[in-house]
């Protein structure tokens, strides 16, 4: 029995990690700028499509028709030469193989620029407007972003292969001294979890141990006073928005091998991650992370056959059910601070 | 009726006239065919109902499509179990969606602001997911609920009415195809508009507006606001159910995609585009979105090429490439852009734009009571 539970726990980790990353970004934006950002899911999607672009560029090839060789159908053979391999040799092959992790290098600057442009261009005009209008404008932006992606990449999902070394499963049970072959777990999901843990740790460390982070935290607590002390808090908050976009984008990139990206992947995650944020408590970073993992793991337990036999359909609604219960019992969410968006 | 102020009466008469003559004045726009007109009516009702909640109380519900879908399902079940006549189906759908709204509203209204939005969203997504999975015996899952020859139809069989061929909904034995279907829906829209107008002008409506402006002060004055917001929620849920039922009448196939949260988003768009809090605004927003959805989605490259024919060769193909991103499949891109622009520059929607233009031409403001375009919603 223990191994079954442990396995479900592991299964919940990768999804929980994705929820936690998106919710972390959402909470960063809400905690600093006080903006309810419905376009955050679109940022996740944009990140995922950075991986698609990188892979497309890396796998570009020249096609030459060689009349001397014949294909099995008797027509002249088309010789395809992948450009990257041709130029860079073995290193190129490694690059193509590891295109997904490699795309993070592109994702970070792209998402930073997108995030800062979004904040400076549109969202800064909405600080003083009601939350309803912030929801509406970011919702509109999300539609625009996903329609642009759809018109470029088409409506279908584009599968991204994971690096060959990281395919297959890890026998975690054997590592822990249990019987071999009982608890196995796809390596890439393990990688995703570790990656998420590193990113979350980095964000927390950044906020906790750097001067910049200290100023931002001070600004989250009392924006006006920090401004009066002569610190340009708005600029720092803009950068935090960019950072949140980067976190969402990286979450999207690394998730592409698990779930092939399409244009509405962001919306699918957005609804869930809003639920996560609210469960964790608006504006609480540890709350967002904890609630992300909690809901991911709960969802994984709810999709066990035994549980489904007990309560049919529970796997479809568990997250929303938990959200409703928590909101009604603990209006601030799990870790919400007193007085922040409390109603 | 006698107590109606003159302006309201004029507005109502004008609205009725505009709706009833739609097949005539929409003909030059290529929109005067029954199928589209029916959708105008149905989504008009949906938006008017949504506005009773959002426009008056400021509570932004992101789950109204659930009531719309429940209304559809209820109507189709009434066709299946009771009778092919639409009147029992309408009544049944309104009651069921009202009860559904009562339950969801009772729970969701314990919170306000963003929490309320998330709660309604969560409930709607729950209904949507369940309609696809566990509730398949009731909803028929992905296939959608359909009418069949072998449905029991207890009322009809008691009256010994027989159906030949594919069963379709009727009104007292008359089929509701074509323009009769439009006028049937139009009747409901006019009634719905009339009721909304009466609600807005009533003390109850005043109370709702008070909640939107400053709920805390309402509390301090000694009002318990919960019953009022709940009543508004249930009424707007019933409107949504009515709209869903009408959609089931015109097309008796209820699918779960009507309940998805994007459908809830659509009615929010309609209301905002037209002008939340105004009476006519949401209806106009619904008409515009449905109209342009229909027109824009139908435009293809051929039409664009003919349109840009007058331009020099290179330029026209460039224009076609650019413009084709915004029509056809790309219609949602246009919608999203328009919506963002409206929210940024014209938060009061089209009605505010009309008011601003009217103000330009007419320096003396007509009604000082209307000079408050942007009350803050309840937080």
Image (spheres, helix red, strand yellow):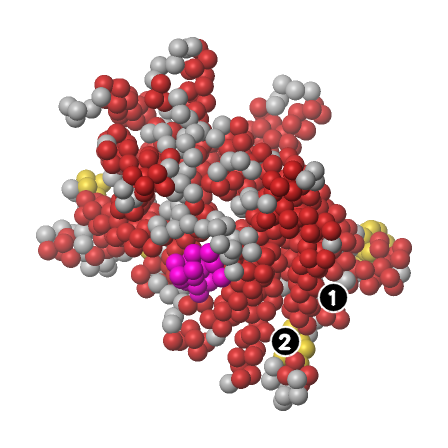
Which stretch did the figure color magenta? A318-334
- Majority secondary structure of magenta residues: helix
For the N terminus of chain B, the image quarter is: top left
What residue do we see at 26% from left, 29% from top?
B201
Residue A16, compared with residue B234, is above or below; it is: below
Q: Is residue B287 visible?
A: no
Mark 2 surroundings: few (<14), some (14-19) or many (≥20) residues within 10 A: some
What residue do we see at 71% from left, 43% from top?
A113
Q: Nearer the viewer, residue A99 or B352?
A: B352
Q: Nearer the viewer, residue A167 or B213?
A: B213
Q: From the image, tell me which residue sits under label 1.
A: A163
Q: CA distance from mark 2 to mark 1?
A: 16 Å
What residue do we see at 51% from left, 30% from top?
B342
Residue A319 in magenta? Answer: yes
Q: Which mark is residue A185?
A: 2
Q: Nearer the viewer, mark 2 or mark 1?
A: 2
Residue A304, compared with residue B121, is above or below; it is: below
Q: Secondary structure at mark 1?
A: loop
């Amino acid at each position: 029995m223990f191994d079954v539970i442990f396995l479900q726990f592991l299964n919940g980790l990768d999804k929980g990690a994705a929820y936690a990353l998106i919710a972390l970004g959402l909470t960063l934006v809400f905690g600093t700028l006080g903006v309810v950002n419905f376009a955050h899911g679109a940022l996740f999607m944009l990140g995922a499509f950075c991986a698609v672009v990188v892979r497309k560029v890396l796998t570009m090839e020249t096609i030459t028709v060689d009349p001397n060789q014949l294909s099995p159908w008797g027509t002249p053979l088309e010789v395809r030469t992948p450009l990257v391999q041709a130029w860079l040799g073995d290193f190129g092959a490694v690059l193509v193989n590891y295109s997904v992790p490699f795309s993070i290098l592109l994702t970070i600057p792209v998402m930073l620029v997108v995030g800062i442009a979004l904040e400076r261009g549109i969202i800064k005009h909405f600080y003083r407007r009601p939350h309803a209008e912030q929801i509406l404008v970011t919702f509109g932006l999300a539609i625009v972003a996903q329609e642009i992606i759809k018109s470029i990449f088409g409506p279908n999902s584009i599968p991204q292969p994971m690096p060959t070394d990281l395919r297959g499963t890890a026998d975690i049970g054997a590592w822990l001294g249990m019987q071999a072959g009982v608890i196995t777990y796809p390596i890439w999901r393990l990688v995703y979890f570790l990656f998420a843990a590193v990113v979350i740790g980095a964000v927390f460390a950044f906020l906790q141990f750097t001067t910049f982070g200290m100023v931002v935290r001070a600004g989250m607590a009392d924006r006006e006073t920090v401004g009066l002390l002569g610190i340009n808090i708005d600029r720092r908050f803009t950068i935090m928005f960019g950072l949140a976009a980067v976190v969402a984008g990286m979450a999207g990139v690394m998730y592409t091998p698990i779930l092939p990206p399409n244009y509405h992947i962001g919306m699918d995650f957005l609804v869930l991650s809003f639920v996560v944020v609210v469960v964790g408590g608006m504006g609480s970073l540890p709350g967002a992370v904890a609630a992300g993992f909690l809901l991911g793991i709960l969802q994984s337990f709810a999709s066990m056959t035994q549980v489904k036999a007990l309560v049919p359909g529970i796997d479809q609604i568990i997250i929303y059910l938990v959200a409703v219960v928590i909101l009604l019992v603990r209006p601030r969410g799990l870790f919400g601070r007193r007085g922040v968006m409390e109603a | 009726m006698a107590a109606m102020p003159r302006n309201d009466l004029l507005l109502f008469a004008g609205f009725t006239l505009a709706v009833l003559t739609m097949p005539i004045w929409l003909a030059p726009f290529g929109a005067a065919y029954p199928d589209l007109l029916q959708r105008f009516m149905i989504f008009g009702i949906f938006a008017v109902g949504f506005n009773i909640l959002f426009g008056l109380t400021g509570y932004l519900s992101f789950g109204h499509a659930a009531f719309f879908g429940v209304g559809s399902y209820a109507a189709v079940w009434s066709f299946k179990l009771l009778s092919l006549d639409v009147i029992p189906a309408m009544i049944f759908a309104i009651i069921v969606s009202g009860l559904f709204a009562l339950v969801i509203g009772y729970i969701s209204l314990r919170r306000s602001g963003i929490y309320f939005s998330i709660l309604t969203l969560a409930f709607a997504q729950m209904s949507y997911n369940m309609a696809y999975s566990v509730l398949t015996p009731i909803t028929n899952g992905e296939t959608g609920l359909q009418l069949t020859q072998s449905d029991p139809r207890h009322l009809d069989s008691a009256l010994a009415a027989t159906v030949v061929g594919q069963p379709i909904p009727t009104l007292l034995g008359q089929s509701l195809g074509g323009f009769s279907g439009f006028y049937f829906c139009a009747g409901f829209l006019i009634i719905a508009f009339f009721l909304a107008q009466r609600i807005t002008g009533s003390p109850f409506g005043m109370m709702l507006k008070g909640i939107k402006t400053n709920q805390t002060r309402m509390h301090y004055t000694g009002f318990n606001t919960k019953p009022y917001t709940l009543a508004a929620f249930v009424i707007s849920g019933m409107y949504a159910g009515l709209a869903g039922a009408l959609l089931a009448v015109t097309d008796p196939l209820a699918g779960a995609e009507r309940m998805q949260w994007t459908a809830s988003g659509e009615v929010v768009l309609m209301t905002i585009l037209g002008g939340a809090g105004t009476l006519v605004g949401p209806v106009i927003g619904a008409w515009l979105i449905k109209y342009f959805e229909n027109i824009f989605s139908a435009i293809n490259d051929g039409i664009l090429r003919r349109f840009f024919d007058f331009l020099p060769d290179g330029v026209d193909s460039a224009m076609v490439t650019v413009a084709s991103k915004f029509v056809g499949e790309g219609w949602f891109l246009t919608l999203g852009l328009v919506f963002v622009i409206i929210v940024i520059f014209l938060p009061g929607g089209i009605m505010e734009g009309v008011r601003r233009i009217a103000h330009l031409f007419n320096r003396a403001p007509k009604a000082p009571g209307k000079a408050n375009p942007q009350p803050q919603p309840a937080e």
